[in-house]
Every structure is written in structure tokens, then in C-alpha cells.
Image: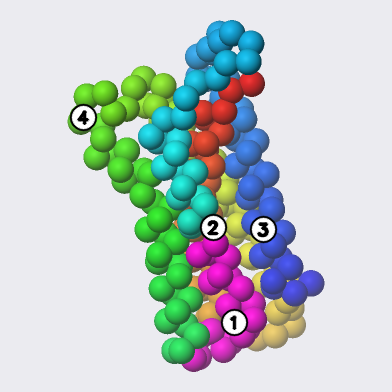
Amino acid sequence: MSVILWTVLAVSLVLLAVFLVARLSRGVLPALDLPPGESLPTTRMQRLAFRALCLGVPLIAAAGGIVAWFGPTVYYDDDSVRLPVTFLLIAGMMVLAAPTLLAGAWVGRDGVLDERDRAILSRAPAGQAAAILIVLAVWIIGLQESYRGQPGIPRVFLYLIFWSCVEVSLLASNIGILIGYRRA
């Protein structure tokens, strides 16, 4: 199986793991009794996490698409490919880290984060470790199968493993925030 298919499998498994961990962590939050047909308004944190995902996922997908189009070896050897991909990955990382960074800045301000926001933010990273472990496992299995019988694995995959772990960790955090606000 090609490395690209392993990457797609890894992302799918990570999203499933993040969903399951976030779903399990919902039981920790206090239940709200709302009248039928009524829902809570979205909070600043919820809107920020949603916007971060809407902006960050296309940046990461564009970087992955460029690497898939040119191939890992060209990405590693050619600066005209590596620099735009690195720019897209750093931009995606900054966008996806914004909700957590802004929440840290908002903690000291009165009225910006309420108890519900704080409870959700404390449980949002619950899926990050599982997401990273799944990505690492899929990378290791995929690379081992792809390069079986060869003397080594190209160094380019160290960069790709690093970036995939960083981006998946940030994705998991934002997905955890959104799932935390979701009410049955």
C-alpha cells in the first residue's frame, strides 16, 4: 500500500479516535436542561475553534496535496516545493493554535470565559495523545511495509511524521472544543 493511502488511513483513524475520546469526555460535563427546541447561543471560544478548523484544514490539506502531487523525495530535495509546503504547515499550525492561545489570554479577563468554557477547555486536549499515537503507529506500519527489504527509510519521512503529529494534535484540540460544546 502506498504511503499516501497510509496517510489517509491515519487521518481517518485519528478523527475517529478524537471523536470517541471527546464523546467519552462529554459525560464529565454537567448536563443542561433546556426546553425543547431551544439551544444555547454559540460562545466566542466555540466560534473561534470552528473558524480555526475552517481555515486550518484547507491549509494542511493544500500542503498535503502538494507533497502528494510532487512526491516526498521532490518535497525534500527541491526548495521551491519544500518552502511553500512549510509555509502552509506553519500557517495551519498558527491558525489551529489560535483558540488555545487566545483562551490562555482570556483566562484573566472577567466575563470572557465562563465555567462551561473552562470545563470544555480542560477536557478538549483529551484526544491529542491518542491521535498522535495512532498517527505514529500508522506511519511506522506504512513505512515498514513500503520499505521492506530495503536498507533504510528516506529521511524525508522524519519531517512528514513530525508535521503530521503537530497538525493532528492541534486538529484534535479544536475538534475536542467543538464536541465539548455540542449538546444532545
Mark 3 surroundings within 10 Å by alpha-carbon count, few (fewer than 14), some (14 through 19), many (20 or more)? many
SS category of the residue bearing label 2: helix
Picture layout, residue 160 above or below residue 174: below
Q: Which residues are magenta?
A: 58-78
Mark 2 or mark 1, which has the lower sequence index? 2
Relative side of 66 to 138, left or right: left
Mark 4 or mark 1, which has the lower sequence index? 1
Query: Does residue 129 appear in the picture of this structure?
Result: no
Residue beneath the point at 32% across and 27% down: 113
Kind of residue at disc 3? Ala
Mark 1 — residue?
A: 72
How far apart are the alpha carbons under marks 2 and 4?
30 Å
Kind of residue at disc 1? Pro
How far apart are the alpha carbons under marks 4 and 3?
39 Å
As drawn, the residue found furthest toward the right would be: 1
Mark 2 — residue?
A: 57
Mark 3 — residue?
A: 10
Determine whether label 1 and label 3 are within 8 Å by CB. Answer: no
How far apart are the alpha carbons under marks 1 and 3?
17 Å
Residue beneath the point at 65% across and 36% down: 20
